[in-house]
Amino acid sequence: MKYLVKIALGLFVYMAAVASCKDDDDSGITGFSIDKEDITMGADGGRDMLTVSSGGEWAASASEPWVSISPANGSGVTECTVLIDSTLINGMRKAEIRFIPRGQAPCVMTVHQTGYGKMIYIEKPDVEIKASDNYSKRYFDMTVTTNVAFKMNTEYDAVPEKEWLTLPKDPTVNLDRGSRPRTAKIRIEWMMNPDFDIRTAKIHFKPQNADDNLEQPAVVTVTQKASPKIEDNRSGDSLALLTIRERLEVGNNWNPGENMRYWDDVVLWEEGDKDLPKGENVVGRVRSVIFNMINTEESIPHEIHYLTYVESLTFFGNTNTATKSITLEDDVCSLRYLKSLTVSAYGLVALSDDLVRLGDRLETLDLGSNNFNSVPSILTKENFPKLKSLSLIGNRRSVLSDLREANDLVKYPDGIGLFFNTKDDNTLRRLFLWDSLEELRLSYNFIEGTLPDFKIGEDGVTGYSQEDVDAFGGDTIQYLINGGADIPKILPKMRKLSVNLNFFTGNLPEWMLFHPHLIEWDPEVLIYNQMEKGLNSEGKMVRFDNVPSTFDAYFKAFPKLKEKYELKE
């Protein structure tokens, strides 16, 4: 037992000695010291460790709020953490941590933080896009990290006819944190590649402030795949039709594995057809085609020009037509056999001036149910001497019966449609002097004023001659060189004229009331009848003042026409 007591007493003495040594070590620290005098941190901030040795108590504080130390007081040997926030500036900034030990002189440690350099960082500097895709998918987004306001420009590998990349007008990034970089997405829209070769472009990002020097250039390389090659043959016609269908998102249900002959709305040239073009392997090529149930924001696709022998083209029925503002471009101009072109309910607001290249062959042009605010100025008899039929029916964006509201840009920022006053605008007069036209459709627009009248001897206007009377059928219209010799010859070949459901007022001109083809125009419906309860820009109810109640005067002048047209009981 005595032996165990001795052992326990020995262990106690040993532990007391060890504890005494440790106390001697701490108490042996004299003065105050830190193991580093400065810290340098990058712009993103972070933490660093610091060892403080002190023989007594101490406290510390930072001179700037973006620096903190923990713990901020202690004694003996203490491990401290220095936290540094990320910076918002470009340049260097400095702070101090002041240590105050009790009974000793203060000690200072300096903190330096470097700022962000001027930068524009592109996450994916190389982009590859398809040759074509649906309109709603023809874009790509770039992730850009930057701390400077920038501008963008495009450098193409070859100067294109049209820029095929559309950059944002104002590529802004919200730099709300000073020089700390912010990240945003920039959307680039692209056009389809009509060529059989790959094409590339570089998008350059440059600081708006010329004095800002980037740490490294910011460039995106865009590579667009080539279109499938379309050859000038029957297979090429088939591929062109399918490509156009894809690009317009057309509803035509064409089976690529089926002969084109069985495709709906497609007519091929046949042996023995009238006007069969001369050339090799013309039979079996596309003669006419109708595209309907369209969904596009663009003009007719470029591939249309591969339909070498097409004679008639129809594009009809774009989705949300009234909201579209599309220019009909010149892709159809190379079609040297094209005689009939219909682009109706498509959303057109303008025509390319180059469309006059169709003037030596186009006979029918239908631009009905579009969004023209005025009749395109290129539509003249000088530009289209072979044109026989012109339709501009129903160019209305809005339903409106009171033209006093027509100029309200808040309600109608894009205009109301085909709207002009014949008092100030000579467009209708110009169209009525187009003496080779056989059909002119102007129904259901917003045209107001009076119908143009003409005088023989002015604007090249003549009266009817004996030659005209003989050509019409002997003495059928003899009145026009006898009692009606002062009636001007206007639209002499016109077989179908419509101006109904507009906003006309005043009198029907005599040249119209005694026109040789008046009865064929169905005037009671397609001429006399104006917008129901319509008010013109002056608030006046629209109607003609001299609408004849019968055709008695007309048949008195042209008795032989009475025999032809008057219904017999």
Image: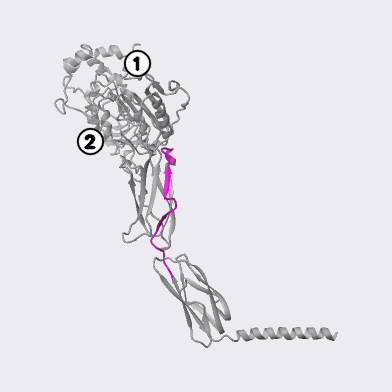
Magenta stretch contains residue 134: yes
Residue 408 image point, x, y percent: 33, 44
Q: Residue 461 or 269: which is nearer the viewer?
A: 269
Relative to 304, does residue 155 appear above or below in the rendering? below
CA neighbours of label 2 inside 10 A, class few (<14), some (14 to 19), many (20+): few
Residue 193 image point, x, y percent: 38, 38
Where are the magenta residues, as a range? 113-136
Identify the residue shown where x is 32% and y is 59%: 209
Quarter-of-image position of residue 5: bottom right
Marked residue nearer the N-terminal end (1 or 2): 1
CA neighbours of label 1 inside 10 A, class few (<14), some (14 to 19), many (20+): few
- Secondary structure beneath disc 1? loop
Left or right: 112 with respect to 487? right
Q: Quick check: can you spot residue 134?
A: yes
Identified by mark 2, the residue type is Lys
Q: Residue 501 or 494: which is nearer the viewer?
A: 494
Residue 94 image point, x, y percent: 42, 73
- All told, the count of numbered labels is 2
Q: How is the image coloured?
A: one colour
Name the residue beneath numbered marker 1.
273
Q: Residue lying at the far left in this picture: please name it.
A: 457
In three-dimensional space, the C-alpha distance between marks 1 and 2, rounded to whole angstroms, equals 48 Å
Give me the disc on residue 423. 2
Q: Indicate the quadrant containing the N terminus: top left, top right, bottom left or bottom right.
A: bottom right
Left or right: 369 with respect to 27? left
Q: Are marks 1 and 2 in contact (CB under 8 Å)?
A: no
Magenta stretch contains residue 425: no
Relative to 5, does residue 271 appear above or below in the rendering? above
- Secondary structure beneath disc 2? loop
Identified by mark 1, the residue type is Asp
Q: Indicate the quadrant containing the C terminus: top left, top right, bottom left or bottom right.
A: top left
Residue 84 image point, x, y percent: 49, 70
